[in-house]
Amino acid sequence: MKPVNLYNWIGSAAVVLLFSMTSSCTDEDIQRSYTATDGIAFTPSIETRSWSTGDGTTTRTTVPVTRHSVMKLNNAQGGRDLYLHTTETDSIAAPLANDTAHIATRGAVVTTDNFGDVYEGFGVLAYAYQGEWDGTLSPNYIDNEQATKTGETYGFNPVHVWPGNAYQMAFFAYAPYDETGKIFNEKTGAPTLAYTVPTDITEQNDLLAYWQTGISGDKREAQQLKFSHLCTAVKFKVGDGLENAVTSISIQNVYGSGTYSVDGEKWTATGEANGTYTFAIEEEETPDGAELTNGESVFMMIPQELPEDAMIEVKYKSEGGQEKEYTASIGGKEWQKGHTVVYTLSKTEIIETAHFTVEAAVSEIDHSGGTLTYKVTSYTETSVDGAVTTTPTAWKITGYQENGSSDWSTDAPDWITVFSASGNGTEEQTAKIAAQEYYVTNPHNDALKSAYSVNGTYDLSTQGDTEPMNTANCYVINAPGKYSLPLVYGNAIKDGQPNTSAYESSAAPAEYILKNLVNHAGNPITNPYIYNNEGCDPDNATLVWQDSPDLVTNVKLSEDKENMTFEVSQDNIAQGNAVIAVRNSNDEILWSWHIWVTDYVPGGEADKDAPMKDKVVTNNQNNKYTFMAVYLGYCGNTGEYYEGRSVKVRFEQEKTGKKYIIEFTQTQHFDSYDTWNVPYYQWGRKEPMLPAQGHNQQSLNKMWYDAAGEPSKAWANSYVKNVKEIKKAIPSWIKNPGKMIGVSVSSSVYLYRNLWNASPDDKSVVKTVYDPSPVGYHIPPRNAFNGFTYNGKNYGNDSWAQFNSPFDSDRDLYDNHYTWVFYCNRMKGEGVHDDAGGTISFPCADQRMVANSPSGDSRGYTWTASCVFEKTFAHSAYCMQFGNSVRVSETYRFLYGFPVRPVRETE
């Protein structure tokens, strides 16, 4: 194991816990290389034999093992005989949340639900290392700092970041953090705790700890901490007829100190076995059957083999008012870690203990409904001199709480039936859950409708004046409001400065290189700002087309004619695409921009599991590309939405009044109508072409609306004939953003290779002013897709072992609505996949040709930034084609309209 010295020392607090560990020096290099979004965070829970229903009420997965014994108490003063019944349970459980409430304080039994009420936070030691953990490293990354709650997780202030995938992590966490004491530094490896039990029962704590090695240093998500109870919980109860009779209880001649080995999970008692712990009981607070030690008054003791002279002393007030002392030897017994020992004082050798639990085998069901089973366990144990008999005990349902309501009802919801309202003893029961009804909705539109409007006029190029100017041909809108954008050619401004590489090629002059990209007039672009180029005089602005009614409105120029403004209203916001343009006084279009209204937020942290988050894909050369979550301009599905719902059911044991709550949940569900759609792009152009209706309707144009709001499904096209240089066709593209442009050329004319990529090769991309992508993204290079097949080659129909996909038949593609799913990590071998990086989806959106509507086939295509240099294919560009075959580098004529899937720019 190679140690890594990384932690940022903040200091130590005095606590009763003592840790034995090695020291290390400070090295914050890795800390500085990450951002706060990579911060180490934790989600704590408490290890138990139980599971929580989410409201603080506990349900058993298995009934805990319970052991009984009984002994007569010694009384040298004479008088009534008293008996001590001992019950040991192999868990530490808190009272049920709907039993008598107790304030969460020191001494309280800690559960997952009350953790934040009992403890402000917890201490953390973190170790960063390379190789295997060998137990010799000191806490070199985080040294006894407190993690406190922030939102749904616990973290640090200042933030500690994950060190990266070159390292493994080990975490030790403990609670409480704010006890008096100190930290050892002389022992290496896993910590060793030393603990002394406070004599005051209200100052004793439910001591918790967690230890884990081998955690990835690149996890970047909350680490689950499952704390263990380290102490033995010791409780006392009184039986019938002893109400208000017991005045004090003490545990004597036990070990009050010990050390705990984290690695061995073992306590070693230390010091003298002379500990005495007394609990005085106020008068009139002990009714029949009461638990004397509850809430903050639970003895939390060192687990140990009890010394021979260990004893319990009880002071008892007789009916005549005389106080008498009773004692019982508990020597030779064992208090085990994480167990509960209950000593019950009784006038008889016979004692009854009621047990009541409810558990559901499965508590969750889908939208279609069905039957759930649960088990009620209700019985009474009668103990006579250690011999135990059981009898069934009646129970009933006393209330229902639907969908998180705080009110209880005596009537069950109408969607849950075949439900027994009462029973006797232990019984298997069923609950029939009705199918949920649906309503038609679009979750993407719902998200947009609920978004808050932007303030004032929001400058899209500066993120609302919060960043340096960055421009693009596509701007993404996530909320209603008024927006502006500068009249700049594509990405000609980057980080507030002219980006000349976007329109002036640095490559050596060649027939297939357009040295200076041209504007609407066919003249070289000489300045990022349109109005600073010769013959480019902005006069007015217009909407060219949009595919959602009244989506983008009030399109106009600013008074200085250097910016364009428009609005997206709260009433009409929805997924959609629009093209807006600046014109001269002859209403000739000088340039246009794509406005994409979507709930997809570009630039966020990539997430392999979230559908609307970017995905990191590794190609066959081990290069990583962060792909946009969806196609550019994607509009998601409308469909049938089934709301989730839940009901808590409260059970009560009639004899004792004990309550138990379980919760049944019916999950939400969305059935898509398969109505997604995306715009199409001709290779080398920045202008989006109208989407189709969606899969199985590709041959139908999506409804679109012109500047006057008139709807249409017809789509105009145009040809530029007899072109001997592609350069002469580009002005027609720019001036006709609402048309697909066909070009009639001879086979000897080259397609300029730098229309979408100013890089001298096709292995990387330098974004140009013709790139249709939004800020921070560009069209992918030719090799970006080659990790989707074995060895990066094209494979024909049914080559399932060579496809880097979970699919293994045509049926999988059909069942998935003709949407290909590829693994993000490259294949490990033929037919051998790596699913650790998640998957990425590519719907088969087909193609649009220079005709009135898309082709309507069942394949998919997406462009790369590269074109073909050979004269044989002079008008062709590279794309990925997928259907029954997967061709990661195929060639098609540049005139075809394909969707595009941008990747993030790299520095």
Image (cartoon, rainbow, N blue to C red):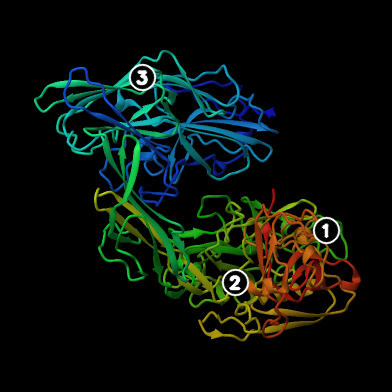
Image-quadrant location for residue 74: top left
Amino acid under disc 3? Ala
Q: Which residue is mark 3?
A: 310
Judged left or right of residue 115, residue 283 is left
Residue 491 makes an appearance in the image: no
Q: What element does badge 3 sit on?
A: loop
Q: Nearer the viewer, mark 3 or mark 2?
A: 3
Quarter holding the N terminus?
top right
Amino acid under disc 2? Ala
Q: Nearer the viewer, mark 1 or mark 2?
A: 1
Tell me the number on the disc at residue 581.
2
Tell me the number on the disc at residue 87.
none
Label located before the other in sequence (3 or 2): 3
Q: What element does badge 1 sit on?
A: helix
Q: Which residue is mark 1?
A: 791
Extreme top residue here? 272
The residue at 75%/73% (across/down) is: 884
Judged left or right of residue 535, residue 321 is left
Extreme left residue here? 320
Q: CA distance from mark 1 to mark 2?
A: 44 Å
Judged left or right of residue 573, residue 685 is right
Q: Residues within 10 Å of mark 2 (few under 14, many from 20)?
A: many
**Residue 623 horizontal/vertical position (percent):** 76, 51
Q: Residues within 10 Å of mark 1 (few under 14, many from 20)?
A: some
